[in-house]
Image: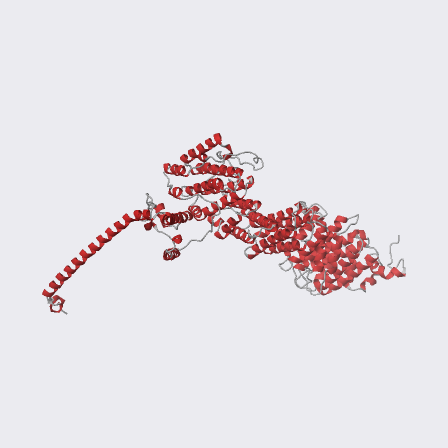
Amino acid sequence: MALIRCCFEPPELPEFFDSFVQRCTDPSCCCGCCSALRPRYKRLVDNIFPVNPEDGLVKSNMEKLTFYSLSSPDKLDRIGEYLYQKATKDINRKRYKLAEIAMEAMDLLLQACHAQTTLNLFVESFLRMVQKLLEDSNPNLKIMATNSFVKFANINEDTPSYHRRYDFFISKFSSMCHSDAASLRDSLRLAGIKGLQGVIRKTVSDDLVENIWEAQHMEKIVPSLLFNMQSGDLTPVEDATNVTPPALAEEVLRELVGRASFGHIRSVLKPLLTHLDRHELWVPNTFAIHTFRIVMISIQPQYSYTVVETLMQHLDSNFKSSPKTRTSLAVVLSKIIAIAAGESVGPSALDIINNLLTHLRTSVSTTTEITPEESQYQEALINALGEFANHHPDYQKIEIMLFIMNTVPDLSKKSRGDQMLQNILLKSLLKVGTQYSTVSFEKAFPASFLQPLLKMARAPHDPTRMVVMQIFQALLDRHQNEQVLSSVSVKPYPALSQEPPSRSDIIFTHKYGANIMQALIDSMALSDRVDALTSSFNTAALLIVEMSCNETVQEFLLFILGIQQVASTVDTLGNVHKCNLHAISIALLVLISRVSGINNLLDYAQKIVDARREEATHFLPPLLEPKKMSGKNLNLALPHLSIDKLALGECLQNAGMDAQRLNTGTPYTLNQTDHPGHRHSWVESVSTQLTQRNSSADLTVYNGDVDSVSSSPGVCKKLLAPEFNFEAMKRALAEPTEAAKREQRERQMQIVRNFREGEFDDLMRRTEPKHDLIQNRLNELFNSLAVERQITQSDNKAAQLQASNEKPIYETNFPELFYY
């Protein structure tokens, strides 16, 4: 081996000029004048390349090049351009090690000189080199180029670039995410995902660069991330050093969604939905649920409503799809809608509810026959509605229930489609009601909500009435007694939970309790189905348990007597139906006796139960099935086994309670109108009474007051309550309750009947003594007035006589003390 080597051997002309520069860098070269003729930055760049490419970058010479770049920043762009040219030649000649050294040198220069004002020109060369490496088929070069781009993306540039574009990088990185190469497949996919993450970070934070939110870019980025997410396990990786493509793709998707503003979130959602449609990932919907949960958790909270709205619009566009696809969409909606509920208030909340109800109505109207798949779709929508309402405060739940109630078709529409829609919407209302925690019945049952609900309780369709009963049960059951009272029984309920009702609940019972109980009686009389009767019993039992007290027990007893009266007097009911109503009445009587703690009433109810066990077991629970009892003869003419109104009054009186309402009132009957009204002012009450008094010529509208009752035949004057305490005074000052109004109407009708049907002589005989007393009293008053007038006249004469004997006032002598 020669001790001195010349750079001109072996001299092949095609390679001479290219190899000349590198050979001149050899310390043993004898032609030192060759390198001295080149610019300094080129000599410094040439010196970083070793003689043997396997040795890697020459660190000491790299430090010299870095120092020179910092000292002469104007040469930075030339250095970058020269490195790019050398790397291009090396890549073309398959010298990949030298190309890697050039890329490494550019990374080090970029990290050291990122604060220079001339960095933009160097970055152009840097990106061209990254692009050159990505275009090559060598996977190692692609991975290295991607890592360099990620390092560049993490640098915050002080000077913005107006002309830089990343179209190529987005396309190339997206294609790397779909790599199926046999070797280094996961590494290439990871590199592609990291590259997309770098593009996102570089472009989202700078408004002056290319808009990455355009559809042409999002349609490449989002599907690439979703493709990697669905290709493996979606569980998070704890070891950060061994990140898998699915986990990294999920992280990048979270970052992308988190950086999206209100105007850009739809740009992400549209390609996401398109990808799920094209790859048929809705059925099964596990991946779709996972993806949308990532979106909802990562998105800015104030924009979460947009995701729900977009998914609903997508559901609109798929109304012709298969029921399974629509069901999966609705399930995804139900899984994510709760996250958006916390940020939806006012109109946006009702807008979501309205959209869900619209989908339900569309589902009912477009199908002539409900299939199991369509039923699952409707249940999914109802669950979504319930999940959405569950995350709202109680006052908004009441608004949502009222909004749903106003959308239920009227009872006058009796077509099959309307009945199905009624049932579906009431199920939606039930779903919201089960999420509501009742504290006060006055707030849970506002008049605008209670009145249409009571109308629906009289619906001719059995499933509709049963759903209404379930709604009542959900709102009435404050102590979780619904399951305890789910069966009709006269046995004690050991697991029953109870507490005394509040004053507001008692006032609510006085105002609306009669309306609710009237609707329950009408509902019981409409069908002989055991499940429908059991549901009505459950509602009535919960009403008694929650509202029973000394002030309401009489009204509940009249309600029980009303059920019995319907069973005894309504001829249109079947025998089995009547027996079941008798069983419900005695079961409610036993229940109210135990709940109110009135032992006399409980003993009386137990006597009736024992007597029925001996003579008529069909008058006791459990309820009878009409189909099983169709051929049997049931004896209904057993008046001695009925509940006696007078006996109930005696039980209350023996317990020291007032029984006047029970004794004077009549039990509830069928088809009584009820209109939950508002609280009238005293001005309205007085004006109403004056109007009614002016029309006293017609006996049917006669409104007798308390004073006129004493002079009416056959009616005794109502005595005041014997106790005069604070509660009695409050009741006296309170407005008349529904029960008191009904009692007044009954008293008026009794007066009218007496005057219409009674004989004239009898009326004269009854009223004559009262007229004599009045005449005598008037005579006494007139005589006293005459005597008083005579005394007054005599006093006036005496005063005049005395005044004539006195001196005039102007002649009175005043003492000197009063002189001025």
Left/right placement of residue 672 relative to residue 152 reads left
Q: How is the image coloured?
A: secondary structure
Q: Quarter of the image holding residue 527?
A: top right
Left/right placement of residue 284 relative to residue 88 reads left
Task: Report the label total.
Answer: 0
Is residue 108 visible in the rendered image? The answer is: yes
Of the pair 307 and 353, the residue shown nearer to us: 353
Is residue 126 visible in the rendered image? The answer is: no
Q: Quarter of the image holding residue 642?
A: top left
Q: Position of residue 612 (x, y in %)?
A: 47, 32
Q: Position of residue 94 (x, y in %)?
A: 83, 55
- In the picture shown, does residue 568 fall above or below 202? above
- In the picture shown, does residue 220 fall above or below 819? above
Of the pair 429 and 758, the residue shown nearer to us: 758
Of the pair 603 and 350, the residue shown nearer to us: 603
Q: Position of residue 139 (x, y in %)?
A: 78, 52
Q: Quarter of the image holding residue 165?
A: bottom right
Q: Position of residue 435 (x, y in %)?
A: 54, 46
- In the picture shown, does residue 796 fall above or below 659? below
The quarter of the rendered structure image containing the C terminus is bottom left
User: Going by the picture, which residue comes out furthest to the top?
Assistant: 614
Of the pair 278 and 160, the residue shown nearer to us: 278
